[in-house]
Image (cartoon, rainbow, N blue to C red):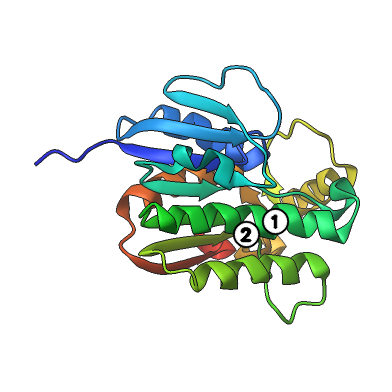
């Protein structure tokens, strides 16, 4: 019996990973529709992709967009510098994914995929990594049949915005790559999104935590 094409709801389609995975999914014949939830209007993002401007303070106002979705793919995220405050950072990295997850469960969506970070831990030294761990743990308690959590290292790809310290770090990592353990080497975004695409179709039910070394 033929399998119906997947309908993917994508959060964070304008970020580095989100943009790249969107292009990858658009070329996938097993994907029938991609629904991108965005904060501000954006240009057409490509074939079989539908862009919806939403208020992330209350996703229940657009709950109909979760109907018939097979997979939620959450690439949304920010930095404390960009968010300005810890509270706003936590809103973007925890509250928005949680809203989507709760609506997903309410609509019977079985699969949730999250882009987290290497080093995410509730005992981590940094607020950033503790926050990443908070959303990971919250999602594990919600009850998806399949939860995939990726913990990439420093992302190596073409960003729309220039981050000086990140660019310097990637340069140094590349230069010293022969001496750096694979777990700490930058995550090549082009390879990363191909793995996301593959896992989307192939990973069985259960909780899957994909560490950086498993992405390279």
Q: In this image, 141 relative to 202: left or right?
A: right
What residue is at 83 percent from the left and 59 percent from the top? 87
Q: Residues within 10 Å of mark 1 (few under 14, many from 20)?
A: many
- Looking at the image, residue 183 lies above or below residue 23: below
Q: Which residue appears at 55% of the width and 26% of the height?
A: 51
x and y percentages locating residue 2 in the rendered image: 13, 38
Horizontal arrangement in the rendering, residue 85 relative to residue 174 (left or right): right
Q: Count the numbered circles shown.
A: 2
- The one nearer the camera, 17 or 192, is 17
- Vertical relation: 14 (above or below) 211: above
Most foreground residue, 9 or 14: 9
Residue at 38%, 62% (x, y): give it.
Answer: 146
Compare marks 2 and 1 and give the one earlier in the sequence: 1
Nearer to the camera, 132 or 90:
90
Residue 94: horizontal and vertical position, in percent? 67, 60
Q: Nearer the viewer, residue 179 or 103?
A: 103
Kindly state the secondary structure of the residue where label 1 is placed. Answer: helix
Q: Residue at the location (70% across, 64% down)?
A: 180
Label 2, label 1: how far apart the Cα atoms are = 9 Å
- Read off the residue under disc 2: 116
Q: Residue furthest bottom?
A: 123
Residue 173 visible from this viewpoint: yes
Q: Residue 77: image x %, image y %?
A: 70, 49
**Image quadrant where residue 164 sits:** top right
Q: Quadrant of the N terminus?
A: top left
The answer to whether one can see residue 181 in this image is: no
- Crowd rating for badge 2 (residues with CA inside 10 Å; few <14, some 14–19, many 20+): many
Where, quadrant-wise, is the C terminus in this rendering?
bottom right
Q: Position of residue 132 (x, y in %)?
A: 68, 65
Indicate which disc residue 104 carries: none
Residue 93 is labelled as 1
């Amino acid at each position: 019996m033929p399998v119906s094409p997947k309908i993917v709801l994508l959060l964070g389609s304008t970020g580095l990973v989100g943009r790249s995975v969107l292009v990858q999914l658009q070329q996938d014949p097993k994907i029938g529709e991609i629904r991108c939830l965005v904060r501000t209007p954006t240009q057409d993002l490509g074939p079989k992709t539908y862009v919806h401007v939403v208020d992330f303070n209350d996703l229940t106002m657009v709950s109909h967009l979760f109907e018939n979705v097979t997979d939620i793919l959450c690439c949304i995220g920010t930095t404390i510098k960009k968010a300005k405050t810890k509270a706003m950072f936590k809103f973007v990295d925890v509250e928005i994914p949680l809203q989507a997850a709760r609506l997903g469960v309410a609509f019977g969506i079985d699969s949730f995929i999250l882009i987290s970070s290497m080093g995410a831990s509730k005992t981590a030294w940094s607020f950033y990594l503790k926050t990443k761990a908070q959303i990971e743990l919250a999602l594990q308690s919600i009850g998806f049949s399949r939860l995939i959590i990726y913990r990439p290292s420093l992302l190596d790809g073409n960003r729309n915005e220039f981050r000086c310290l990140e660019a310097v770090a990637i340069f140094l990592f590349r230069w010293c790559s022969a001496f750096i353990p694979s777990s700490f080497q930058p995550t090549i975004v082009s390879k990363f999104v191909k793995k996301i695409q593959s896992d989307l179709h192939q990973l069985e039910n259960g909780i899957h935590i994909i560490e950086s070394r498993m992405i390279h």
